[in-house]
Structure formats: structure tokens, C-alpha cells
Image: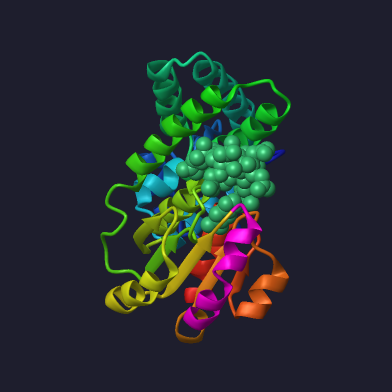
Amino acid sequence: MASEGLLRIGELSRRTGVKPDLLRAWERRYSLLEPERSAGGFRLYPASSIDRVTAMQEQLARGFSAAEAARLAVLEGDAPTRSASIDSLVAELSDALEGYDEPLAQSVIDRMLSAFSVDAILRDALLPFLHELGLRWERGEVSVAQEHFASSVIRGRLLGLARGWGAGSGPVAILACPPGEEHDLGLLALGIVLHDRGWRVAYLGPDTPMETLAGAAARVSAKVIVLAAVNPKRFEAAAAALEHLAKRHQVAVAGPGASAAFAKRTGALLLTGGPVDEAERLTADRR
Ligand code: B12
């Protein structure tokens, strides 16, 4: 330790396993680190730099470019301020959508995208907002019109983020909702974060006939088929077809309508977490 709470570059290098040259390069090129200078001109790093460097290594391991990894690592380190401001952006978004103000809602989402990672926006802002919207609708605090308006604007943005998700050379995930199921926002979110982790996405979306899935899966050599539904009855109605499909392909079921008992009975994998966590899991299982 150089002085109370401050580290010299050698110490930071030992603690993180990253060579001093590389630490200096990350500092110079991407402003990952913000050292003070000792009286003698040595760099002195706050202890929080260890977390930043660790976060940078994690983002690089996920396949992000060095510039993007550094941006995400810096955002991660500022977590307390971030969560405060992501909450305030969600409040602004909610007001804009309730007032049917589409341009304002888009600009709030633009601000989210410029300040936070897509993972954080989905996990901490848009998906909880949608969930809350449903509760507020149940309590009579927002009308059906406001709920439809809000979910349409958000769906449009998710589709924008999804553009090009079929590109690349990674494994293919087919994403669909079983027949009769219209709720596809969680599924869209999963596709976006899967593509960020190197997957290609073939999106079939709401209300997909079960009999069409096997042909699609064979055609694209799907690594996994993910089916999502809010209503368990949609899964029940598709159980026989799903069980058949799961004999030939890796099938996963997700969303509030999926249960452990159903997954076990049909031979599907149950995804119990949110889209970001489950994208992580599917990606880890693939390795
Ligand atoms: C937006 C919305 C709609 C939109 C859907 C637009 C679209 N393209 O998706 C529209 C207007 C079309 C709609 C229609 C209906 N809806 Co609606 N809708 C909602 C709302 C407000 C948000 C849903 C949403 O996207 N949430 C975001 C998801 C991702 O978050 P979540 O639900 O908390 O899910 C968590 C986990 O379960 C998991 N997860 C969820 N999905 C997925 C998917 C994957 C792949 C993974 C990995 C994880 C995952 O991640 C989340 C945590 O991060 C909910 C309210 C709510 N509480 O969810 C009602 C809600 C789901 N709808 C409901 C109802 C009743 C309906 C209608 C029957 C209304 C009607 N009378 O017409 C129809 C049914 C249409 C149909 N046939 O499917 C009820 C469902 C009740 C039930 N248990 O069955 C809800 C809960 C509202 C309520 N409080 O009553 N709806």
C-alpha cells in the first residue's frame, strides 16, 4: 500500500493479475482508472480500482471490445449513483407514457441507452416498469389505453435493439410463444441479451403454432428453442407437441406461466429467472 487506501501500480497489478503496462494502456485509452499522483509523481490508485479492473476483465471475457468493456466497467463501479438515476429515468418514462407523449418517452429511453448497459436497462428499468404497469392497471391507476400505449412504445424500442440479432456465427436460439400467447416482451428481452452474448436469434414471436417449430429448428440447427408464456394454460395446451419437440431438441420454457412440474413432465428446461440471468445461464451451459 502506498498510503491509506491508495495503491501503487505494482500492487494493483498483483491484486488483479493484470500487467502494469496493460493497466496504463486501459487508463490512457479508455479512462478506466483515475489515479492520483504522489509528491514524487507516482500513480496512486484508490482501492475501488480493483473492482474496475476486475469488471473490465469480466466484460472482456464476455466478448465485449476493450472500449465497450471499459465503459461498462466504469458504469458498474458507479452502481449506487446509477441505480438512483435509473430509477429517476424510469419515473420520467412512466410520466411520459402516461401522458401519451411518445417523443418524450423515446428521448428518456435514449438517455437510458447513453448512460447504462442494455442488460441494466432491461433488468432494472424496462421489465420492472412493465410489471409495475400491470399492477397499476389492476389497481385502476392506469387505463387499458395507457397500458397498451406504453407497452407498444417499449416493444418498438426492443425491436429496434433487436435489429441484426440473426447475424454472427454463434449458436442459434429459436424464440417463440405457444399458441394463443401474446405476451412476448420478456422473450424479446431474452433475444437481445442472448445476441449480446454471441447467439444468433431466430424470432418467431407471439402465438406460434407448435407444429412449425420442428421444421424451423432443423433448418437453422437450433441449439435451443425457448418458449415463453404468461398463462400456464397456453403451455398445457401445447404440452404434447412440446414433449415431442423436447425429445429431439433442447427446449426451454420461461415466463410466469412456466412451472417446474410442467418442465419435468415434458422434458423441457425451466428458466425461472429474468431474461438477463437466463441468457447468462444458457450461455454458460453452452460452453
Ligand atoms: C404488456 C402487457 C400486455 C400486452 C402484451 C404486449 C406484448 N407484445 O407482450 C397486451 C396488451 C397485448 C396484453 C394482453 C393481455 N394481457 Co397482459 N399484460 C401486460 C403487462 C402490463 C406487462 C407484461 C410484460 O411484458 N411484463 C414484462 C415481463 C418480462 O416481466 P414479468 O412479467 O415480471 O416477468 C418476470 C419473469 O416472469 C420473467 N419472464 C417473463 N417473461 C419471460 C420470458 C423469458 C424468455 C424469460 C427468460 C423470462 C421471462 O422475467 C421477469 C423478471 O425479470 C402485464 C403486467 C405484468 N405484471 O406483467 C399484463 C398481464 C401479463 N396481462 C394480463 C392479461 C389478463 C392480459 C389479457 C388476457 C387481457 C385481455 N383481457 O385481453 C391479454 C392476453 C393476450 C394473450 N392472448 O396473451 C395479466 C395476466 C394474468 C395471468 N396470470 O394470466 C397481467 C399480469 C396483467 C394483470 N395484472 O392482470 N398484455
| Quarter of image, res 169 | bottom left
Q: Does any portion of residue 188 appear in the rendered image?
A: yes
Task: Tell me if 164 is positioned left or right of 133 in this view.
Answer: left
Q: Position of residue 259 (x, y in %)?
A: 69, 65
Residue at horizontal 55 percent and vertical 28 percent from the top: 147
Q: Is residue 269 above or below residue 135?
A: below
Residue at horizontal 38 percent and vertical 64 percent from the top: 199
Prevailing SS of the magenta stretch: helix
Quick check: which quadrant has ligand 1?
top right
For the record, the magenta segment spans 230-245
Q: Is residue 108 above or below residue 188?
A: above
Q: How is the image coloured?
A: rainbow
Residue at horizontal 45 percent and vertical 22 percent from the top: 108
Q: Position of residue 22 (x, y in %)?
A: 40, 54
Camera-nearest residue between 177 and 52 = 177
Residue 277: in magenta span = no
